[in-house]
Structures are given as structure tokens and as C-alpha cells.
């Protein structure tokens, strides 16, 4: 019996160490703005996550990916359509819908215009729907559903990927 318990604890320990220490890389498209084409362009990023996060903390992965989007592109010909000061406050995922709660800077610092609004919204939506467990995205501001960011695009309901605005 002692031998069985020792083997059980050893195997459990190995599994826990494997999930907490080892990282796994995922390749993901993050959508940025091309000012010359006035379209979104995917930029591939290889991002490493701890295995336990991939299995149990998908909300943290979404938050990390949005942080990459806010940080901006590697290609200096592309721009981030995310307004200055924007932060992700909270993320939850239910029924393949990512509910992403942004700080008010997403709306307050948005430059406006219908094209700018489309680019901001769909850079978020198209990036997150690259993940296999997200089909739609609900954008929230300070925990509330709002009608639009700058008065042009209805974001009161979860949105699906839209490839029509890609270069």
C-alpha cells in the first residue's frame, strides 16, 4: 500500500510540474491597421503560455493576446487601432463568446470616424476569433454593454469575425 501511494504521489508530482513549468507556443494572427490600404492586416505572432494556462485559464490567454494587440505591431508599416491608454479590465468566456471588459479609454480616446471604429472593433474581434474556443466577442466598457464606440457600429450584441475589411 505504501508503495502504491508513493508511486501515485510521484506521478501526480510529475504531472503538476509538467503543467506548471513547461510552456507551449501557439501561433496566432493579430490584426493591425495598414494606413496606406485602410484595411486590417494579420501579423503572425508566436506566443508562449504555460500548459496549465492553456487548459484552465483561457481568460488569461485572451487578456494576454489583447495586451499584444494594444502593444502594437512588429512591422513598422502597420499601426495598432487601439486608442491610447486602453486596458483590459476583465475577460470571461461562456458558450464560445468572449466577454472583454475594457477601460473607458477605449471609447474616450477613440479618434472617431466610421472607418476608425470598424478597424478598432474588428481588430479585437478578428484577433480573438482566431482562438478555436471563441466564435464571437462582446465588447464591454467599464462592465457595461454599450451601443457603439464612436456612434457608427452597433456593439450591443456579440460580434463574429468579419474578413471583408482585410487587405
Image (cartoon, rainbow, N blue to C red):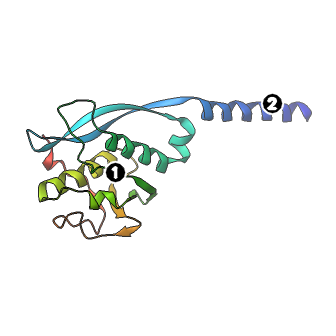
Rendered position, 114 above or below 2: below
Relative to residue 20, is residue 64 drawn left or right? left
The residue at 32%/42% (across/down) is 69
Quadrant (top left/top right/bottom left/bottom right) for the N terminus: top right
Residue 128, position as x, y percentages in the image? 34, 48
Kindly give the residue lying farthest to the right in the view shown: 2
The secondary structure type at the circle numbered 1 is: loop
Rendered position, 137 above or below 46: below
Which mark is first along the chain, 2 or 1? Answer: 2
Q: Quadrant of residue 112?
A: bottom left
Categorize mark 2 by other alpha carbons within 10 Å: few (<14), some (14-19), many (20+).
few
Task: Give residue 75's mark.
Answer: none
Relative to residue 59, is residue 128 drawn left or right? left
Identify residue for label 1.
Answer: 85
Task: Give residue 7's mark.
Answer: 2
Relative to residue 136, is residue 4 drawn left or right? right
Rendered position, 71 above or below 162: above
Q: How many marks?
A: 2
Q: Quadrant of residue 110?
A: bottom left
The residue at 19%/57% (across/down) is 117
The residue at 20%/64% (across/down) is 150
The secondary structure type at the circle numbered 2 is: helix
Residue 38, position as x, y percentages in the image? 10, 44
| Depth order, front residue of 108/23 | 108
| Depth order, front residue of 45/105 | 105
Residue 158, position as x, y percentages in the image? 31, 63
Give the Cα separation between the discs numbered 1 and 2: 51 Å
Amino acid at each position: 500500500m505504501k508503495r502504491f501511494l508513493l508511486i501515485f504521489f510521484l506521478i501526480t508530482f510529475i504531472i503538476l510540474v509538467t503543467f506548471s513549468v513547461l510552456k507551449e507556443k501557439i501561433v496566432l494572427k493579430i490584426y493591425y491597421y495598414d494606413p496606406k490600404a485602410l484595411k486590417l492586416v494579420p501579423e503572425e505572432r508566436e506566443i508562449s503560455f504555460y500548459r496549465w494556462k492553456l487548459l484552465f485559464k483561457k481568460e488569461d490567454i485572451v487578456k494576454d493576446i489583447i495586451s499584444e494587440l494594444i502593444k502594437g505591431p512588429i512591422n513598422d508599416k502597420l499601426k495598432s487601432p487601439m486608442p491610447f491608454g486602453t486596458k483590459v479590465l476583465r475577460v470571461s468566456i461562456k458558450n464560445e463568446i468572449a466577454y472583454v471588459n475594457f477601460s473607458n479609454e477605449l471609447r474616450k480616446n477613440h479618434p472617431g470616424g466610421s472607418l476608425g471604429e470598424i478597424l478598432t472593433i474588428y481588430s479585437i474581434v478578428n484577433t480573438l476569433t482566431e482562438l478555436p474556443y471563441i466564435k464571437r466577442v462582446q465588447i464591454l466598457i467599464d462592465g457595461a454593454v454599450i451601443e457603439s464606440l464612436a456612434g457608427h457600429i452597433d456593439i450591443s450584441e456579440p460580434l463574429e469575425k468579419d474578413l471583408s475589411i482585410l487587405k
